[in-house]
Amino acid sequence: MTARFLEVKGLHGWYGESHVLHGIDFHVDEGEVVTLLGRNGAGRTSTLRAIMGLIGSRKGSIQVRGTETIAMSTHRIARLGLGYCPEERGIFSSLSTEENLMLPPVLAAGGMSVAQIYEMFPNLLERAHSQGTRLSGGEQQMLAVARILRTGARLLLLDEISEGLAPVIVQKLAEMVTALRAQGYTIVMVEQNFRFAAPLADRFLVIEHGEVIQEFTQAELPSRMARLHEYLGV
């Protein structure tokens, strides 16, 4: 039986007075890729932020490999092997690619070496000494993911990594997700680009108004397309 990496039950979340998550329930097994689908404002990014403790306040249950994290601070949650790649990427523009890679702390054993990163992302090797400001959007996205892989995180929370990027770069990111899955990483993706997400995920969760309203597997995808079109306009 596959071990459960993440289990979210009855998760409510707030930004100040604004109640944005209304009882989120889902789980992610070790080595699984799960995509959160939904319209803008549905609560997908807030779900990732709540898992990391980056939301105003939260209640419910978030267990990481059986450890309850709902009362934990963000840095302690990260040390359980979680890595969050936000939509804004957060590249340090005054530092070179390699300096950005050397910044993250080691949170858990098994993080990728710089050499392994360059093997997975040859573009970053070519740009090793380029300042962050000189990287293309696609190169910045690769760097943002690569920094997480340096920390030893095994559960990756990826927020809209394909957004606004050229098709050739999106294809490279798809290859990256496939390669990471083959290496045993567990991945939760928020994606608006359905064509990118569709072939990559084992399961899909549709979030609307801060709740999971649909869940289906890769095998069930063809039979759910009409319903997805209604929910997402894809």
Image (cartoon, grey):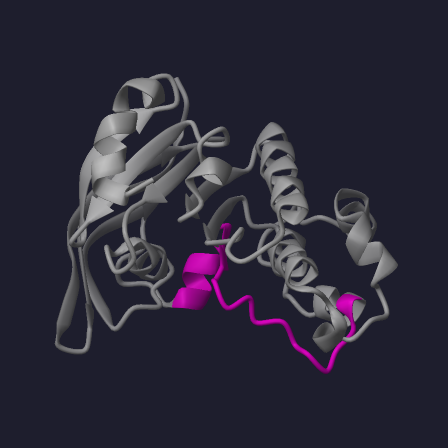
User: Relative to the observer, which residue lies in front, 103 or 65?
Assistant: 103
User: Relative to the observer, which residue lies in front, 67 or 156?
Assistant: 156
- Residue at the far bottom in the pictured view: 94
Chain part drawn in magenta: 74-97
Residue at the image position 71 percent from the left and 48 percent from the top: 112
Number of numbered discs overlaid on the protein picture: 0
Left or right: where 19 falls relative to 137: left
Residue at the image position 77 percent from the left and 67 percent from the top: 97
Identify whether 179 is placed above or below 220. below
Left or right: where 161 falls relative to 190: right
Where residue 65 sits: x, y (%)?
39, 40
Q: Is residue 131 magenta?
A: no
Where residue 212 sits: x, y (%)?
20, 42
Residue at the image position 34 percent from the left and 19 percent from the top: 222
Identify whether 2 is placed above or below 173. above
Where residue 12 sits: x, y (%)?
16, 58
Where residue 120 sits: x, y (%)?
75, 43
Using the rendered image of the protein, determine whether residue 228 is visible from the camera's viewpoint. yes
Left or right: where 191 falls relative to 144: left
Residue at the image position 34 percent from the left and 40 percent from the top: 234
Q: Quadrant of residue 3?
A: top left
Quarter of the image with the N terminus in it: top left
